[in-house]
Image (spheres, rainbow, N blue to C red):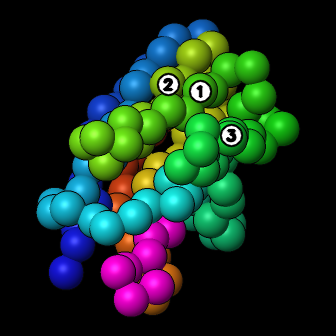
Amino acid sequence: QVQLAESGGGLAQPGGSLRLSCAASESIFRIFIMQWHRQVPGKQRELVASISDSGRTIYDDSVKGRFTISRDNDKNTVSLQMNNLKPEDTAVYYCKYKTTTRDNEIRDYWGQGTQVTVST
């Protein structure tokens, strides 16, 4: 069973930066979408950024111009560079891989989450 592990969360001051990374525990046949989601207590998990295997990116309006998603297809990793952080960015951040197997079966994998706190 593939496992995803996030790293890079922590505490940042408003206006500061953090970089999140996500890696898989084993090789994956094809990852056609890599995403970052976030969730705060009492609210639904929301999509923050997405990147396709062709490099097409999508961002939530709240992070456009501040966050950058990137992927390394050789290493099957995805990163999220977060700049100009705001207190409202405080959340648990999750990576998600949408994958296909050699038999064209679609499988989704989630990381366990990493806490990002933006505060003075």
Residue 67 pos. (x, y %): 62, 26
Residue 104 pos. (x, y %): 46, 85
| Mark 2 and mark 1 residues within 8 Å of each other at the beta carbon | yes
**Where 1 sits versus 84, above or below?**
below
Using the numbered discs, state the Cα–Cα distance from disc 2 to disc 3 in whole angstroms: 13 Å
**Where 86 sits versus 107, above or below?**
above
Q: Which residue is mark 3?
A: 57
Q: Quadrant of the N terminus?
A: bottom left
Residue at point 83%, 38% (across, down)? 61
**Mark 3: which amino acid?**
Thr
Task: Give SS at disc 1.
Answer: strand
Residue 95 colored magenta? no
Left or right: 28 in relation to 105: left
Nearer the camera: disc 2 or disc 3: 3
Using the numbered discs, state the Cα–Cα distance from disc 2 to disc 1 in whole angstroms: 5 Å
Residue 105 pos. (x, y %): 45, 88
**Mark 2: which amino acid?**
Gln
Residue at point 20%, 62% (across, down)? 27
Q: Which residue is mark 1?
A: 68
Q: Which residue is mark 2?
A: 81
**Where 118 sits versus 57, above or below?**
above
**Mark 1: which amino acid?**
Thr
- Mark 2 and mark 1 lie on one chain; the one further toward the N terminus is 1
Q: As rendered, which of 40 and 26 lies closer to the eye?
A: 26
**Where 29 sits versus 88, above or below?**
below
Q: Which residues are magenta?
A: 96-104
